[in-house]
Amino acid sequence: MTGSRGAAVLAGVLALAVVLLFVVAVLRAPVPLPVVAHLGGPGIRVGVIRGEWAVLVPPAVVALVAAVRATGRLQRSATVWAVGAASPIVLFLVARLNGVAEAVALVLVYAATAGGVLLRSVQRPGGDPMPIRWAAVLGVVPWGVVAFTQIGGRLTGTPVPEGVPLLTVVVLAASAVEWLVAYRRRDRERCGPLDLALAALPGVLLAALALALVP
């Protein structure tokens, strides 16, 4: 199967998955995720994320990128950056589900993950592997914030909702596998269907588990 054909098939599969998850989202109860900001004083609510809809965004992003990649209009570095756009959204939502509600903290979680994606996108086949290594160092920071918040909630008697710890571990494992494969395939000229599929995996798992487990 050629890269373009594989990308097209993956785009179709992901689109179908998003449609099925959309149906589940319509049928299930809302998952409101408030975002607050203290701004030097008492916390104020700056917005509410509809979790059941937000979790559909990462797999939809990868589906769109795979569809464009199938046309041959995206080069390798552009594909890495474009498909990586789903990663900051995944981390943002995982952090919020784990109780990180402060807007400033969520922005930093998003920014750190996006910075790791940017470093990965400058990696060139046969070049110095340090960019993708530093990407891992930067990308692990948001997961530390998530772990700190989850542990802190347990210690203060305000644990995260049932199902969120399992969701977190599964998405973390999928993200780690995706990075490991990307590192081992860093000298390849093209971002192929396997790379795209693994990039989609954390978002698909997040959406499926959030809709199934989060009350």
Image (spheres, helix red, strand yellow):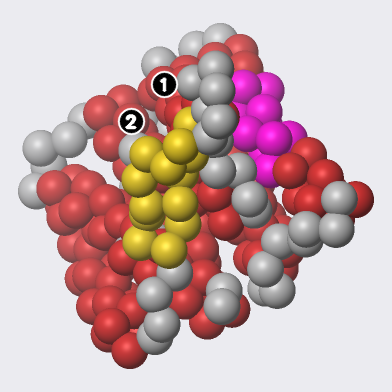
Q: Give the camera-side residue of 173 and 190.
A: 173
* Residue sitting farthest toward the bottom: 27
- Disc 2 + disc 1, Cβ < 8 Å: yes
Q: Quadrant of the N terminus?
A: bottom left
Quadrant where the C terminus sits is bottom right
**In x, y percent, where is residue 110?**
47, 32
Q: Give the amino acid at mark 1.
A: Leu
Mark 2 residue element: helix
Percent across and percent down for residue 160 are: 71, 61
* Residue under label 2: 81
- Crowdedness of circle 1 by 10 Å Cα count: few (<14), some, many (20+)? many
How crowded pointer 2 is (Cα within 10 Å; few <14, some 14-19, many 20+) is rated as some
- The reply to whether residue 178 is visible in this rendering is no
Q: Residue at x 78, y 58 (%)?
A: 158
Is residue 118 positioned above or below 24 on the image?
A: above
Q: Which residues are magenta?
A: 136-146
The residue furthest front is 42
- Considering depth in this image, is 72 or 208 the residue closer to the camera? 208
| Residue type indicated by callout 2 | Trp
Residue 139 falls within the magenta-colored stretch: yes
Residue 56 image label: none
Query: Where 176 sits versus 74, above or below?
Result: below
Which residue is tagged 1?
A: 118
Q: Residue at x 86, y 50 (%)?
A: 156
Gap between marks 2 and 1, in whole Å? 6 Å
| Earlier-in-chain disc, 2 versus 1 | 2
What residue is drawn where x is 67% and y is 28%? 141
